[in-house]
Image (cartoon, coloured by chain):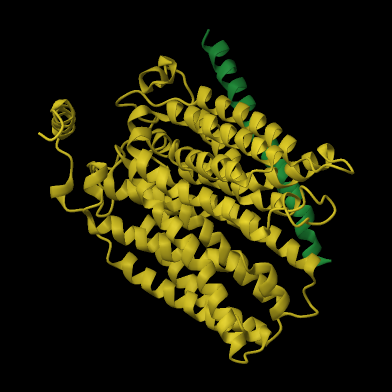
Amino acid sequence: MSFLDRSHTVAGPGFSRWLVPPAALCVHLCIGQAYAFSVFNLPMSKLLGITQSAPDDWKLTQLGWIFSIAIFFLGVSSAVFGRWVEEGGPRKAMFTAALCWAGGFFISAIGVYMHNLWLVYLGYGVLGGIALGIGYISPVSTLIKWFPDRPGMATGMAIMGFGGGAFIASPLSVWLMAKFSTATHIGVAETFIVLGVVYFFFMIVGSIIVRVPAPGWKPEGYTPPVVAQKLITKNDVFVYDALKTPQFWLIWAVLCLNVTAGIGVLGQASAMSQEMFPGHITPVAAAGFVGLMSLFNMGGRFFWASTSDYIGRRNTYFVFMVLGFFLYCAVPYTGSIGSVALFVICFLIIISMYGGGFATVPAYLKDMFGTRYVGAIHGLLLTAWSAAGIFGPVLVNYIREYQIAHGVPNAQAYNMTMYIMAGLLVVGFICNFMIEAVHHRFHMKPDHEAERAQAEVAAVSEPAGA
Amino acid sequence: MQQAQETSIGLKLVLAWAFVGIPLAWGVIQTLINAMKLFQ
């Protein structure tokens, strides 16, 4: 299996760096399926009853755990395996992610066939979640090394794929289920098997294409800036030393707050639009609105990350926080004047910045901690996403319930939520404002890495308890 | 020789981008068709 090693993926002369973004997209478009998993929830709640849920069928609340477990393991695996991904190279990581992702689908298919929910939790939730974590971070540092002149655009392209994966998975899954379903059977298991095979093929193609640049490689005509920039380091920080810096935790907070604000409204957009504009936005129109939001979520990843190459990462997050603050505050006003158009515009910009937050953060980490361990540090930072996945929906749901319980009309029940989200962005602005260059004591010395490796080998060879 | 290498790289680029671009474009079009319901 040596062809998977980093040493076997070093690009030869004549290799075009523009082959690396499609390699990264091969992985991210596949694992982005996670955003479309909800299309299976209703069919999986009628596997025994077929036309309607039977008493022994799985409940929607039980099925909701599959996605939650997967997102939990995304955060855990990206944090735990980040250093392994960085040191093993992108091909090994992409190959492992492909095995886990396809394996997760196959185990889930067996679970559906045997009607054993624990197998689905294990398959899609645990194994699929590990694939999500490893796959998500696998191309990040490679792209940054290939595009030192435009790191934001490069990582934005890959992370855009994660947002776009649902566009393919959702209609494809619905079509496959229709093909495999009969009057007495719902074709979820067969759909899982086909998806597993297709995704495995795609991800393996990505792992074959991907290459790392040769040491010292630079794009033609590119000269690194001679004058040091205040917030762009030329040094590297070791992955676990990054955890000791305030910068890591400030960026963690900035990402968590930006995602909390976005994720909270993303899940509620359909219901919110219908309740704020009763009679104006129908359920069909609301579904269209959600689709449009997904497009802006994807497009924002590329747009904002590319913009950050020109205006800087910190300034990009300042735009997210300031513009987001005014837009969240404006949403209740759009409801009060009954302007659907303004409401839609506000939400589309907000959601583009939600996606942009994800896509800009790898380049922000590269600016702060250098390129050597940026993938592993990014993996650790993704725990902010897991945390936001809990905070966002909880905030929106509980505040809305509290408002309605205290007699606030449905149309105005989201106003307080919007103001709280705007408040979160103020905190995010302060955190972003406090970010400055990493202190030089955290920078890796030239021989630092070798010393550390020797110390680790020595520690492993010592007898237990020594 | 140089020209043959450039053609080969160009072909690889077209194939790689088509491999990911075509499914993505199909998905975006499907989503856009659904999104149009907002304006009907």
Percent across and percent down for residue A381 are 37, 52
**Is A249 left or right of A346, judged from the image as shown?**
left
Location of the N terminus of chain A by quadrant is top left
Considering only vertical position in the picture, is A448 above or below A217?
below
Percent across and percent down for residue A26 are 57, 33
Q: In the rendered image of this protein, which colour is used for chain B?
A: green
Percent across and percent down for residue A261 are 50, 68
Picture mark count = 0
Specify the farthest residue to the top: B1
Q: Residue at x 55, y 66 (%)?
A: A350
**Is A26 left or right of A380, judged from the image as shown?**
right
Location of the C terminus of chain A by quadrant is top left
**Is A396 left or right of A232, judged from the image as shown?**
right
* Closer-to-camera residue (A204/A112): A112
Q: For residue A114, which quarter of the picture?
A: top right
Considering only vertical position in the picture, is A11 above or below A76?
above
Q: Residue at x 35, y 58 (%)?
A: A252
Q: Is residue A156 visible?
A: yes
Specify the farthest residue to the left: A466
Q: Residue at x 43, y 72 (%)?
A: A425
Considering only vertical position in the picture, is A371 above or below A434?
above
Q: Which chain is yellow?
A: A
Q: Residue at x 48, y 63 (%)?
A: A390
Q: Is residue A228 visible?
A: no
* Closer-to-camera residue (A145/A24): A24
Percent across and percent down for residue A120 are 60, 43
